[in-house]
Amino acid sequence: MPAPNKRSRTFRRVYRKVPGGKTVLHYKKRKPSKAKCGKCKAILKGVPRERPYKMRTMAKTKKRPERPYGGALCSKCTREVFKEKARSKK
Amino acid sequence: MIEIGRLAIKTAGRDAGCKCVVVEILDNNYVLIDGGTRRRKCNIIHLEPLNEVIKIKKGASHEEVNAEFKKLKLEVRETKPKETKDRPKKVRKEKKKIEEKGDKGKKKAKKEGKKKSEVKKEEKLSDKLTKEGKKNK
Ligand SMILES: [Zn+2]
């Protein structure tokens, strides 16, 4: 029987192959929800879904698309934002 | 709307939100742009044209475009070539030298050890002799 705090599903279960050839069960904390667009709530592409300790090890360029509003707005919404800006200047 | 000298705002990619000017029309879909963005080929879908038109030649150089942009007090993107820095090169230590050094050190140690032990034996022997001598006396 696993430890009492690991009997519930608050932890996610990951099968790991250990060097000895066995597969063992590891308990890990669940991943956070996917990043969403601030305007239309669509799921953002190119933004990894990882725990903070793993996000800290990643490079900045790996965590968001390299464009203005990258990682905050989706590509469709950024286009709309810039189009509105261009049209309001006329 | 899309013609040579037309000012536009780029709406997609890394240069999104930057003002640029159409320098050359390549085909039905693509144009060459320069100015606030990098000098590059661009799909016209990714451009939002503005009202202004600048007088420039077809295929105007980067300097000409820059001069026109500075007259209008617009931002210009200057791309510098990367400076090559002198990195500290990793020098591999030669294995042979280390081995020789190690061997020498070991040999020396061994020799010294031998000497010491020999010396001790001699001392012991001398002690025994002296003791025997005392007994004899
Ligand atoms: Zn959106």
Image (cartoon, grey):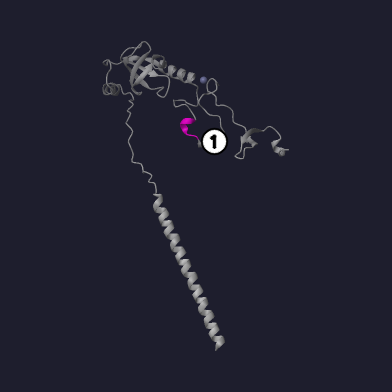
Q: Label 1 lies in what chain?
A: A
Return the residue nearer the eye: A62 or A24: A24
Residue B44, visible in the rendered structure: yes
User: Which residue range is magenta in the image?
Assistant: A58-62
Q: Which residue is mark 1?
A: A54
Measured as percent of width and height from the top left, residue B87 is found at 36, 41
Q: Which residue corresponds to the image point at 46% horizontal and 17% vertical from the top-left? A: A80
State which quadrant residue B7 falls in.
top left
Measured as percent of width and height from the top left, residue A88 is found at 42, 16
Magenta span: chief secondary structure: helix
Q: Which residue corresponds to the image point at 50% horizontal and 76% vertical from the top-left? A: B123
Measured as percent of width and height from the top left, residue B11 is found at 42, 19
Residue A90, visible in the rendered structure: no
Judge from the rendering whether residue B112 lies leftward or rightward of residue A32; answer left or right: left
Location of residue A35 with respect to A84 vertically, above or below: below
Measured as percent of width and height from the top left, residue B34 is found at 33, 21
What element does badge 1 sit on? helix
Q: Which residue corresponds to the image point at 36% horizontal and 21% vertical from the top-left? A: B19
State which quadrant residue B69 falls in.
top left
- For badge 1, the amino acid type reads Lys
The quadrant of the picture occupied by the C terminus of chain B is bottom right
Return the residue nearer the eye: B97 or B2: B97
**Which residue occupies the extreme right position in the image?**
A1
Location of residue B73 with respect to B86 vertically, above or below: above
Location of residue B78 with respect to B32 vertically, above or below: below
